[in-house]
Amino acid sequence: MSDFNEKSHRAVKISIDLAALQHNFQQVKQHATNSQIMPVIKANAYGHGLLQVADALIDADGFGVAQMAEALALREHGIEKPISVFQGFLNAKQLAQCLQFNLRPAIHQQWQLDWLKKNTVSTSIDAWLKINTGMGRLGFQPTDVDAAYQQLENNQSINQIGFMMHFANADEASHVSNLQQLERFKNITDNYENAVTSVSNSAAILADLLPQQNWLRPGIMLYGASPFADKSAAQLHLKPVMSLHAELIAINQLQKGQAVGYGGDWVCPQDMPVGIVNIGYGDGYPRHAVEAPIAVNGQKCKIIGRVSMDSVAVDLRNIECNSGDEVECWGRHISVDEVAASAQTIAYELLCNVGRY
């Protein structure tokens, strides 16, 4: 019987800097003078480890996840703070779990209200009423909110009812739809005395789109990446939490005109050293990265040619190194946002993908 364990035998190494995570949380607190903070730790805390991130954020007022399984894992781990489930319960069993484990589901569909009507358990919980102000994903249309609210208010299973929305374009702070969504949200919630509200994700927090609200929902900024295309994480005073490392396993002396990698897309412009690093898309590194930055032995250079399943080639001109040296794919020297841009994607995807392997 083999005792092979995929994760323990990976050539790559993921390091999580919990002190950096806590630093980024403090950056959120600077925007939260009158708000509580609900760190978003869905998708295994964006690849950083659901439970260790929850344990590290001891000053959080609660947590936000997407799915019931994540919420149940937190409760099983001993997390007692409020946990909001953004997709809410999806069936009668999950509704029962919300009641049993005191979870705060988002109510966004009429059928969820119908399930609540059928419930006979005497336990009661808080809930979020999600409003579709322009995202077009989950939530009641503005014209249907009051009817949904009345159903929740009249249901014995529900205590406090909060209002929640999500921006479609908060990563573009000046986008016209941001103010339109806020106006729709406020036009509704202003009708309810002392309404509990939650609006802002990382981009909206950093842009101060709505300073006055009860709950902030920071996500990507906690992990040290920028939600904006035109502002770096460093400019936002954020520190990288995840570092991804591999190893330089070969140095090839190639001649001018020699091709590198599948398809021969990249050709050496001169006689030059080319390194091979033992990481690829099989490890979650983005296959479509083009000349992504990378650091060999602490020296910044770039990837050349196509990313393979378990290796990448790097340009070692003017780099002092030896086989066996450490390579940083992103972390303190290399911004994950830069790597994401080279692959025409976003840091969220890279962090989640690597954390999944």
Image (spheres, rainbow, N blue to C red):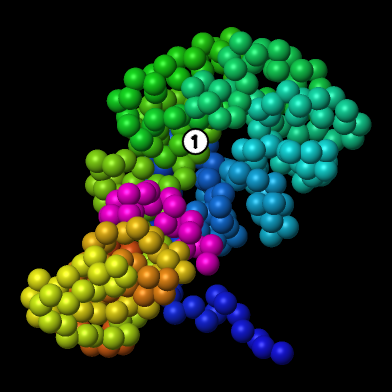
Q: Which residue: 76% across, 27% down?
A: 111
Q: Could you tell me which residue is drawn at 39 percent across and 31 percent down?
A: 170
Say which residue appears at 73% left-offset and 38% top-offset: 89
Give the main secondary structure, helix, strand or loop, of the magenta stretch: helix
User: Count of labels shown?
Assistant: 1
Q: Which residues are magenta?
A: 335-357
Q: Quadrant of the N terminus?
A: bottom right
The answer to whether residue 258 is magenta is: no
Q: Using the image, determine if residue 41 lies above or below residue 329.
A: above
Q: Is residue 319 visible?
A: no
User: Seen in the image, is 264 located left or right of residue 336?
Assistant: left
Percent of width and height locating residue 102: 75, 42
Camera-side residue of 327 and 150: 327
Badge 1 amino acid: Leu
- Image quadrant where residue 23 sits: bottom left
Q: Is residue 350 magenta?
A: yes
User: For residue 287, what is the image quadrant?
Assistant: bottom left
Mark 1, residues whose alpha carbon is within 10 Å: few (<14), some, or many (≥20)?
many
Q: Is residue 215 visible?
A: yes
Read off the residue under disc 1: 216
Disc 1 element: strand
- Which percent across, then down, holds residue 327? 30, 75
Measured as percent of width and height from the top left, residue 54 is found at 57, 55
- Determine whether, in the image, residue 79 is placed left or right of residue 280: right
